[in-house]
Image (cartoon, rainbow, N blue to C red):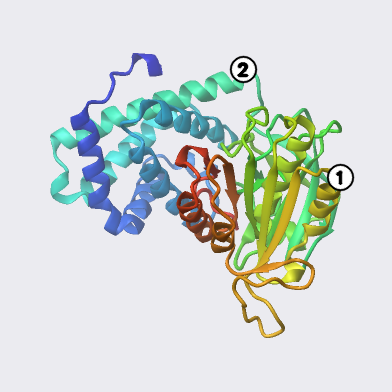
Amino acid sequence: MSAAGQSPLTARDAELVRAGLAAVEPVADRATAHFFALLFLRFPELRPFFPAAMDVHRALLFRTLVDVVREIDRPAALRAMLAEFGRGQRRYGTSAGHYAAVEECLVGTLARYAGDRWDAEAEAAWRRAYRMIAAVMIEAAEEDARTSPPWWQGEIVRHERRTRDVAAITVRPDQAYPFRAGQYAVLETPWWPRVWRHYSFAGAPRRDGLLTFHVKAVQAGWVSNALVHRAVPGDVLRLGPAAGEMTVDHTAGRDLLCLGGGTGIAPVRALVEEAAEYGVPGRRVEVFYGARRAEELYELGALRELASRHPWLTVRPVLSEAGPAGGSTAGGLLPGGSLTGELPEVVGRFGPWSGREAVLSGPPAMVRRGVESLRRAGVAAEWIRHDPVGGPAVG
């Protein structure tokens, strides 16, 4: 199947695809459960490609459909998204032949749950759309296979607890691992086979090839709890290829504004390191580092040490809970220079930020509010970068 040989979708196709997905959305949980039941019933040989517990995969399926349909009439953006999806599918062992099975089960699911939005015309539009999607993904996977493995083996060489629930984990990959500061990798642990979670790189590429990730153990998070509380040096992980668009051109000259909340400080730290090596003279970088309490600002000392060596770097810690009772004195300044308040609002008060390039990383709610605050403070939308909100589950 070749992407070049696929007929372009029409405006009517896009309309029908959007309408079908909108009809299914209220019953998305039942629809995705039905899809996987069909897939495993009709094609039982595919069951071993998936984890035992399917809750995350069901949610991810519908989220992916929403993301794809949102871009369906923006060919360049859609193709870039699908190419990344296609490359990522290699780690599961997906082959070109599997896409036809998915098409049949997807069409069967839509026929059952799309109600009066489903007819012969809608089915034809969905099949055209799916075949275009599959062609781009297959082409990207085949191209990637010529130069990269489907995954890397990585041995844990250092495991450092930064807080009760956060660990910095350093990994030595078995071969060269290309990535950029601001990107993330998907990791699989030996304790939860076929369960992958994504974590941002906490440093820029190093000459020794080592990779560091900051992992926070979250409630009911299988992978994160294993990595924080169970992993030790010598354990071997699997890594998928680097992904994500939160990268920065350090030669562009725009001053850089970074918002990092919790372990979202990891890619910010990586970008600061990259700026130190490749940034143009005169370019300023301002980092706002947010957490609930002072003890959760585990990377503050390292960032301040970088700022002491680089006068173009400013680091501002922000605490949303101040004082022994956790009360906040919004807008105030604590001993040690920490600001108080919610990170997006504090950053907004320091504006305007027009002419800046901005990156945001942290909990989804923080990123959403941060984007709104930056827009109000004068940052143009095209200069705001963050990973997809509600992207691959971290757990």
Q: Where in the figure is residue 16, as x and y percent of width and height?
A: 20, 38
Task: Give the amino acid type for the residue marked by disc 2 in the picture.
Answer: Arg
Image position of 191 (left or right of 144): right
Q: Nearer the viewer, mark 1 or mark 2?
A: 1
Which residue is more in the foreground, 301 or 241? 301
Say which mark, if any, is on residue 146. 2
Label 1 close to label 2 by CB (< 8 Å): no
Q: Secondary structure at mark 2?
A: loop
- State the image quarter where residue 149 is shown: top right
Distance in Å between CA atoms under marks 1 and 2: 42 Å
Residue 108 showing in the rendered view: yes
Q: Where in the figure is residue 371, as x and y percent of width and height?
A: 49, 51
Residue at left 74%, top 70%?
Answer: 294
Image position of 134 (left or right of 305): left
Task: Give the amino acid type for the residue marked by disc 1 in the picture.
Answer: Arg
Residue at left 65%, top 81%?
Answer: 326
- State the image quarter where residue 344 is shown: bottom right
Image position of 121 (left or right of 324): left
Q: Where in the figure is residue 57, as x and y percent of width and height?
A: 48, 50
- Residue marked by disc 1: 309
Q: Where in the figure is residue 105, as x and y percent of width and height?
A: 33, 41
Which residue is more in the foreground, 390 or 203? 203
Which residue is more in the foreground, 183 or 270? 270
